[in-house]
Image (tube, rainbow, N blue to C red):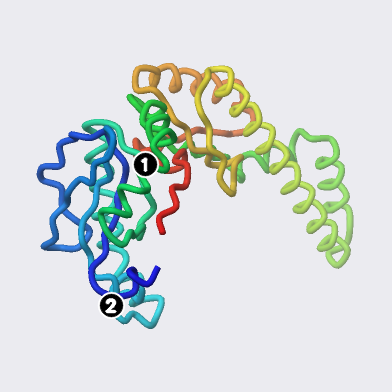
Amino acid sequence: MEALLTGTVLYLYGLVPAGVDITGLAAVEEGSDIFLVVRDGIACIASAVPASAYQCPAGASTAAAQLEWVTPRACRHHDVLQRLHRTGTVVPLKFGTLCADAAQVQALLEDHHGAVVALLAQFAGKDEWTLNILVDETALSAALQRDDPDLVRLAEEERCLPEGRAYFARKKLQKATAERVEELRAHVGRAVLERLCRLGIEIALGHDAAASPALLVERARFAELEAALDELEQAHASAFVRFELVGPWPPYSFTTTMGAP
């Protein structure tokens, strides 16, 4: 680890088949060159960066200064991966992944050779998409308060009470409505995940799995995914739900963590 604290280190972008074309790729640091570190048919995309800058980003002491330093570099990191993904297959590494030197990168490639080869095979011809499951809460709440017997009863109670007591009844109605909306949102989310599993689509669940799962989709089957989501929208029209696919991205959410020293 001491090698990462001083001098120049290697910044790692992603893992690719050996021999991939890296012409025209712009490094995370302006003026630096991107190159391949190759081992046994696989390679790591790398460039040299000053170690001190990545230990304490450009002396940034505030959150705003850190964001100003990180943003352009994170964009360049993503651009490298996106361009590699468009023309072939890449296993993305996290922004800020460093290694002391090429020998250490080659050792990583040797240690993780089987896993890298498997991921490259898994990702070939596929894109990551974020599926946003969006619910019109205002419309759904109004429909529930009109049609759900329990909520209709609470609404009637509120209307019949004097203002002071009606306030608390209104809060109770709002709470019960919000809980029912969340129940329906979760129900739709489960139905979507079950349908996608039946289609054989790989899914990565984030912090809010019911709202925005990540999908790994074969490009040749993208129309099939869209058709399935259209059917699900129609089946759950009473929940005022719609689906939004955002992407395509390199398979960030499906990459096994490759720990660099």
Element type at mark 1 = helix
Above or below residue 207? Residue 99 is below
Q: Residue at x 28, y 45 (%)?
A: 44
- Judging depth in this view, the residue of 52 and 248 nearest the camera is 52
Residue of label 1: 110
Q: Which quadrant would residue 7 be assigned to in this image?
A: bottom left
**Residue 36: x, y in percent?**
20, 45
State which quarter of the image contains the C terminus.
bottom left
Circle 2 is placed at which residue position? 58
The reply, left or right, for residue 122 in relation to residue 54 is: right
Q: Secondary structure at mark 2?
A: helix
Residue 251: give x, y in percent of width and height: 39, 38
Three-letter residue code for mark 1: Glu
**Residue at image coords 35%, 43%:** 109
The reply, left or right, for residue 204 in relation to residue 154 is left
Label 1 and label 2: CA atoms lie apart by 33 Å
> Left or right: where does residue 72 sit relative to residue 255?
left
Nearest to N terminus: mark 1 or mark 2: 2
Tell me the number on the disc at residue 209.
none
Question: Label 2 sits on what residue type?
Answer: Ala
